[in-house]
Image: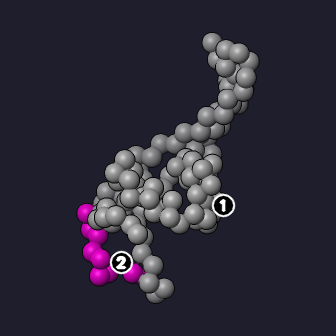
Amino acid sequence: MTEILYDQVGRHGMRSTVLLDEGGRPLIRSSQNVAGILEQNKREAIDWQPTFQRNAIRARKVASLPFVVWQQLQAAGVVKGTRVVDEKAFLQFLSDRDVRSLRTDNGGRLA
């Protein structure tokens, strides 16, 4: 049986839990209810129009990522803090069909 040492839900809906496994080792588990983010992404993808998506600096929004996904990318060294440090790996991640629900554009391959 696992023992919960700490369990807290933060202001952005991310839950952090620290437990002890059967061997007495601590495990840190992060989770987040992402249903709202995925629903908003779906709405934005439906309304996506390439000619209206660029802002003043010619950038465009292509995805909304939950905090738990950002943490995974940070652990992999793709992002650090709020910055993308490995753009090639980041674009490859966003182009993967398994994360299509995070995209807010047409889902085409990102270069």
Instruction: Determine the secondary structure under disc 2.
Output: loop
Q: Earlier in the sequence, mark 1 or mark 2?
A: 2
Amino acid type for the residue under numbered disc 1: Gly
The alpha-carbon separation of the residues under discs 1 and 2 comes to: 25 Å
Specify start and end residues of the magenta stretch as a single range.
46-55
Give the side of residue 32 with respect to residue 108, left or right: right
Q: Point out which mark residue 17 bears.
A: none
Q: Label 1 neighbourhood size at 10 Å, few (<14), some (14-19), many (20+)?
A: few
Membership of 54 in magenta stretch: yes
Query: Residue 77: image x %, image y %?
Result: 62, 55
Q: Dot 2 corresponds to which residue?
A: 53
- The extreme top residue here reads 1
Q: Relative to 56, does residue 2 appear above or below in the rendering?
A: above
In this picture, residue 110 sits left or right of residue 22: left
Element carrying mark 1: loop
**Quadrant into which the C terminus falls:** bottom left
Residue 53 in the image: above or below residue 9? below
Main secondary structure type of the part rendered in magenta: loop
Viewer-proximal residue among 111 and 46: 111
Residue at the image point whose x is 73% and y is 23% from the top: 25
Which residue lies at the image location 50% right of the left edge and 60% below the top edge? 90
Residue 100: x and y in percent read 35, 53
Q: Position of residue 3 (x, y in %)?
A: 68, 19
Give the camera-side residue of 16 and 20. Answer: 20
Q: Are marks 1 and 2 in contact (CB under 8 Å)?
A: no
Q: Amino acid at mark 2?
A: Gln
Q: Quadrant of residue 16?
A: top right
- State whether residue 81 is above or below residue 36: below
Sort mark 2 into few (<14), some (14-19) or many (20+) by Cα contacts within 10 Å: few
Q: Residue at x 74, y 18 (%)?
A: 24
Residue of label 1: 81
Q: Residue at x 27, y 68 (%)?
A: 47
